[in-house]
Amino acid sequence: MIFAGYVFENARSISPFLELPRTGPTSQFCAELAGRLCCYVAAGYAELLGDDERQEEDTILADGTVARQIGANSAVVYGPNGQWVGEYRKSNLFSIDKTWAKAGNGFATFHLPAPLNTVTLGICNDLNARDAETWTLEDGPYEVADHCIATETNLLIMLNAWLDSEEDGDSDEDWRTLNYWAARLRPLWVSEDDGEPSEDRRRLSTAAGKRVVAVMCNRWGDENGKTFAGSSAVFDLRRGFGRPVLLQVMGRRQEGVEIWTV
């Protein structure tokens, strides 16, 4: 959520920052930027729910948390000429979201002109399984990765507010977080064979429908006692290749604009 921030104690504290879809400041910003640069722009925002969805009374979650669904952790996409392309609501809510946000119904996939082609959009904790207690490395579930395979996604964009791992604090990048992101996309690169990728495996993994470029956009800095990992990155993920390939990465304390060719 590029303008609102992320760490809010409850529904009341985030309420002043909720925006209407398409007409709110984030949508206006994305439309203007996309039109001016003749490109596609995606950004997260705190969406204000309509009267038919918004809860008027508090509810108590299973863990005792007081919650009231008044908004959604959402994202919007605008294209060249500033036109609206689509939107998405975060499906797998993090604990911070659950006090105020309504979950979405699944990942969003858009069919855009080349070279973007089939694009899937997710938000942060969507990388994790909804039922985290049953997750295993071998069997997952890998919900985002499986969706990318099913939809033959070419480009995966994750809009994140991922917390810093607090490991290797002197390192310019948060490598634990980067490795975690890659591991959660394991079906997009894992091979049943051991060892270094062979030339045959390298050739097969470049076939149509086998490659996903994953763009991990993550904020950095501090907010209300939470520190974020930064380390925005681009991965080249090829089915059956045997390992993820990190193409580009920003620092964990770096804010800026990067232009990367993949």
Image (cartoon, helix red, strand yellow):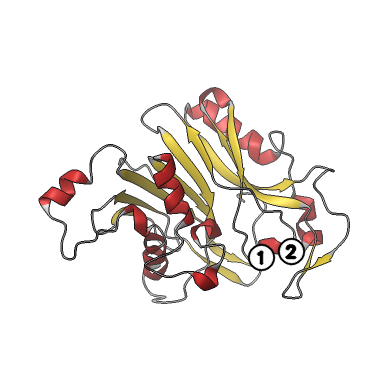
Is residue 172 visible in this depiction of the protein? Answer: no
Task: Give the x, y percent position of residue 147.
Answer: 46, 48
With respect to residue 251, does 159 lie above or below?
above
The residue located at (11%, 50%) in the rendering is 199
Q: Nearer the viewer, residue 35 or 46?
A: 46
Which residue bears the numbered disc 1? 96
Describe residue 139's horizontal placement relative to residue 47 as left or right. Answer: left
Confirm or deny contact between disc 2 and disc 1 (CB under 8 A). yes
Which kind of residue does numbered mark 1 sit on?
A: Ile
The residue located at (74%, 63%) in the rendering is 99
Describe residue 193's horizontal placement relative to residue 107 as left or right. Answer: left
Q: Nearer the viewer, residue 247 or 117?
A: 117
The residue located at (19%, 62%) in the rendering is 193
Residue furthest right in the image: 57
With respect to residue 133, does 21 lie above or below?
above
Task: Give the x, y percent position of residue 152.
Answer: 39, 40
Whole-number angstrom distance, CA of label 2 to CA of label 1: 7 Å
Describe residue 129's horizontal placement relative to residue 214 as left or right. Answer: right
Q: What kind of element bears circle 2?
A: helix
Quick one: label 1, few (<14), some, or many (20+) residues within 10 Å?
few
Quarter of the view holding residue 245: bottom left
Residue furthest left in the image: 199
Which residue bears the numbered disc 2? 99
Q: What kind of element bears circle 1?
A: loop
Task: Give the x, y percent position of residue 100.
Answer: 75, 59
Which kind of residue does numbered mark 2 sit on?
A: Thr
Q: Nearer the viewer, residue 96 or 138?
A: 138
With respect to residue 60, does 74 lie above or below?
above
